[in-house]
Amino acid sequence: MQISKNSVVTLNYILKNDQGETLDESQDNSFLYLHGAGGIIPGLEGQLEGKSAGDSFSAHIEPADGYGERDDSMVQVVPRDMFDKEHPVEEGLQFHAENPEGDMLTVTVTKIEGDDITVDGNHPLSGIALNFDIKIADVREASAEEVEHGHVHGPDGHHHH
C-alpha cells in the first residue's frame, strides 16, 4: 500500500542538521502519523507521498518547508518579575505562551542577564535545514474515526479528555 491521504504511517527516523549532529530520532516504530492531516512538516509529508512499507530514503528539507525561517520579532527581553517566583528561571527553560492572534506557542529562555530575560518564540528547529534518514515500517488505511479526528488512535483506542 502506498502512502496517500488518510494513510496511517509508522516510521523510524534519524534527524540531523547540516553539520551531521543528531537532533532527534524515533524509537522502535514509535512514530505514527495520519498522512494529509498536517501533523508533520510539509516538506517531509511531500517526500513520503507514494512511498510504501519497507522503503528507506533520505530527505533534505529546507527551513521554509520545515519549521520556517527564524523571525527576529519573536525574540524579546522581558523583566524577571513576569515569571512566577516559585519556579527558577534558567536558560533552556521552555513554556507555553499565547501570541497576539491567540495561538499557543512554545517559548524558550535563551539568555539571562540580571533581571533581563531573553525569550524566543521561534521553534527551536526554525532556520535550520533538516536531514532525515527514514525507514517506513508500516502503512495502513486510517479508520473513519481517525480521519474525523485528524490524528492516529493507539492500539487500545483513543480516549478524549
Image (cartoon, rainbow, N blue to C red):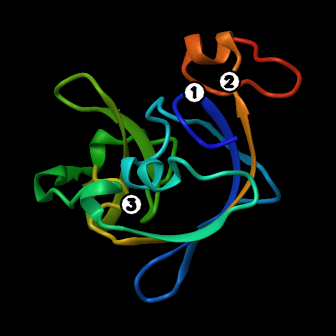
**Image location (x, y in percent) of residue 74:** 18, 50
Q: State yes or no: discs 3 and 1 in contact (Cβ < 8 Å).
A: no
- Under circle 1, the secondary element is loop
The residue where tag 1 is placed is 6
Answer yes or no: do the residues labelled 2 and 1 have beta carbons within 8 Å? yes
Residue 92 at least partly seen: yes
Identify which residue is drawn at 45% across, 62% down. Answer: 90
Counting from the top left corner in percent of width and height, residue 38 is at 43, 34
Tag 1 or tag 2, which sits nearer the N-term? 1
Q: Nearer the viewer, mark 3 or mark 1?
A: 1
Specify the quadrant of the image occupied by residue 113.
bottom left
| Residue at which label 2 appears | 142
| Kind of residue at badge 2 | Ala
Residue at the farthest left position: 73
What residue is shown with label 3? 124
Q: Position of residue 17 (x, y in %)?
A: 44, 78
Looking at the image, residue 94 lies above or below residue 127 = above
Q: CA distance from mark 2 to mark 1?
A: 6 Å
